[in-house]
Image (tube, rainbow, N blue to C red):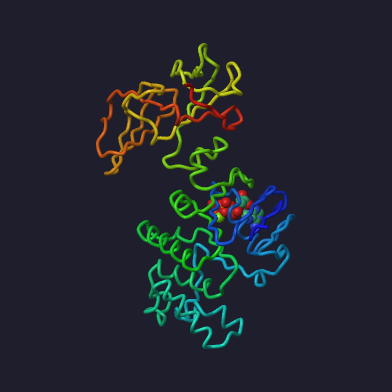
């Protein structure tokens, strides 16, 4: 049995169905990240695990104990929120120690645990300060410290870094990972941030509309998305999609036709493909190439917008007015300029195919 098991979780808020048949297993010491669009149910699921929400049906089992109907304080989980909710009148030490003092732990024990957490979080020199004398990142560390000292079975984080500026977010991300490795805790972490999800997670859970779309390692989801939604959600900038119709071509391969594009020959074999079926071709911006190579399909385009980020350059290329701009990510500080004509090469091994319902169609390279 897994360390944390969510079994057929359903949640209704009156007539609104917020969580739908959620099944999930989290192993001990895993760092699991929930991602998905706003309103998809990430916080609801996290709050259900913590006990701040009651589920309509289903079971939550933590370390072999059914905690589904247990009071939040008895579950042995700790939650860190986006707004850290520190007590303004208490200093850092007392803010961190608060839960332990409530539990009635011995003073010496409390001091030992708080000092250990403070060292881990680089707060040793700030124990006497009040929250208003701390930066945003330091306040967030105090909130995390308050959880660490409780030695919970499970850490729950709901967008803990989203109130911090970009630079601090990067630093705290690394610190959180360090704490995770040092304390070997099990964590469920909600974020909007692609980079946080990809870099922190052992396992990412992609949610949409109250349902789990896919669960897997960051690379699994990046390389083998099960559907168009996950393909578009994981990866930044997002995958390009061309909508059209596909058929098996004479002599092998797939002929793909779309308004404005004409016919594109794909050197791929897809077993399930019917004749003239609705088909979406997906390709990631980082996989498009401007130089020809074998086993690639070609599309002519005109560069419309150039975004230069220093080490990399994003091109927005127009194939035809009726086709959304295609994004190309170049690992270079220079590239074609606005108005320039380019040929986009779609390496066959990097092409994704999706059917009318958005499900991924497995395809093999023609040899
Ligand atoms: N107490 C409530 N009563 C009714 N509906 C609610 C309640 N709480 C949340 N919802 C609805 O449930 C859905 C999921 O909300 P939730 O807060 O879990 O989304 P989320 O994925 O965390 O979104 P965000 O990324 O914006 O934080 C939303 O449509 C929301 O409006
Ligand atoms: Mg939320």
Point out the image quarter for the N terminus: bottom right
Q: Nearer the viewer, residue 20 or 292?
A: 292
Q: Nearer the viewer, residue 345 or 127?
A: 345
Whether residue 327 is visible, yes or no, is yes
Q: Is residue 211 left or right of residue 286?
A: right
Q: Is residue 83 left or right of residue 78?
A: left
x, y percent for residue 70? 71, 68
Q: Quadrant of residue 171?
A: bottom left
Residue that sits furthest to the bottom in the current view: 107
Q: Quadrant of residue 270?
A: top right
x, y percent for residue 41? 61, 51
In which quadrant of this rendering is ligand 2 seen? bottom right
Q: Residue at x 50, y 53 (%)?
A: 201
Q: Is residue 65 left or right of residue 352?
A: right
Q: Is residue 243 left or right of residue 103?
A: left
x, y percent for residue 88? 47, 77
Q: Nearer the viewer, residue 362 or 13?
A: 362
x, y percent for residue 231? 51, 38
Work out whether 214 lies above or below 154: above
Image label count: 0
Work out whether 27 lies above or below 96: above
Whether residue 12 is visible, yes or no, is no
Q: Nearer the viewer, residue 366 or 72?
A: 366
Residue that sits furthest to the front in the current view: 367
């Amino acid at each position: 049995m897994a360390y944390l098991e969510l079994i057929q979780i359903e949640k209704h808020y009156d007539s609104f169905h917020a969580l739908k048949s959620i099944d999930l297993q989290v192993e001990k010491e895993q760092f699991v990240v929930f991602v998905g669009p706003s309103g998809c149910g990430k916080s609801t699921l996290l709050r259900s695990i913590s006990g701040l929400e009651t589920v309509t049906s289903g079971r939550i089992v933590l370390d072999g104990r059914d905690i589904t109907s247990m009071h939040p304080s008895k579950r042995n989980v700790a939650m860190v929120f986006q707004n850290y909710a520190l007590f303004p009148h208490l200093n850092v030490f007392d803010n961190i120690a608060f839960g332990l003092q409530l539990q009635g732990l011995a003073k010496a024990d409390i001091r030992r645990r708080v000092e250990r957490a403070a060292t881990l979080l680089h707060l040793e020199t700030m124990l006497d300060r009040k929250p208003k004398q701390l930066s945003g990142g330091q306040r967030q560390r105090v909130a995390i410290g308050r959880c660490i000292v409780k030695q919970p079975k499970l850490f729950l984080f709901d967008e803990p870094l989203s109130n911090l500026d970009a630079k601090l977010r990067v630093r705290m991300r690394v610190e959180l990972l360090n704490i995770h490795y040092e304390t070997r805790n099990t964590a469920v972490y909600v974020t909007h941030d692609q980079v946080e999800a990809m870099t922190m997670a052992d396992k990412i859970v992609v949610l949409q509309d109250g349902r789990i779309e896919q669960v897997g390692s960051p690379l699994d989801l990046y390389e083998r998305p099960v559907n168009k939604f996950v393909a578009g959600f994981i990866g930044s900038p997002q995958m390009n999609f061309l909508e059209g119709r596909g058929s098996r071509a004479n002599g092998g391969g797939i002929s793909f036709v779309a308004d404005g594009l004409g016919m594109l020959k794909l050197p791929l074999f897809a077993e399930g493909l019917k004749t003239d079926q609705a088909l979406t071709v997906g390709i990631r911006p980082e996989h498009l190439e401007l130089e020809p190579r074998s086993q690639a399909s070609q599309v002519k385009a005109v560069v419309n917008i150039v975004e230069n980020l220093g080490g990399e350059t994003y091109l927005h290329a127009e194939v035809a007015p009726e086709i959304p701009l295609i994004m190309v990510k170049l690992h270079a500080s220079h590239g074609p300029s606005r108005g320039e004509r380019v040929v986009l090469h779609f390496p066959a091994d990097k092409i994704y195919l999706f059917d009318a319902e958005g499900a991924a169609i497995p395809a093999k390279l023609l040899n």
